[in-house]
Image: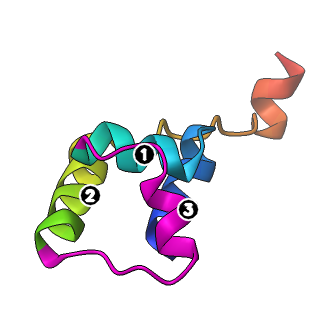
Amino acid sequence: MQEIENYALARGILPATVVQTATGHSGTTWAKWQSGATCSLRTAEKLRAYMAANPPPAEPTSPTPDEDAA
């Protein structure tokens, strides 16, 4: 669940959206997992495959002092 939360935060979306997009499960699946329901290995593999295939955008880098002066 922490992996999904981290990924969602990096993408600027809700964890429920990640689950729904990656697996096709309903939007309530995330809430059920938070309440103690379990995730199947097959679903976990789908989630990890989706997150690996759709990485969050790289964060913009801060300019170096030389670039900032230009």
Task: Tell me, yes or no, whether the two marked residues, 3 and 2, touch with CB atoms within 8 Å.
Answer: no
Residue 53 occupies quadrant: top left
Mark 1 sits on what residue? 18
Q: Residue at horizontal 48%, vertical 35%?
A: 57
**Viewer-nearest of labels 3 and 1?**
3
Q: Is residue 14 left or right of residue 28?
A: right
Disc 2 element: helix
Kindly identify the residue that appears in the image at 20 percent across and 76 percent down. Answer: 40
Label located before the other in sequence (2 or 1):
1
Percent x, y of residue 58: 51, 40
Relative image position of residue 32 (x, y in whole percent): 49, 67
Q: Mark 2 and 1 residues: CB-CB less than 8 Å, in contact?
A: yes
Q: Earlier in the sequence, mark 3 or mark 2?
A: 3
- Above-or-below relation of 10 to 2: above
Looking at numbered disc 1 in the image, what kind of residue is underneath it? Val
Q: Seen in the image, is 50 located left or right of residue 17?
A: left
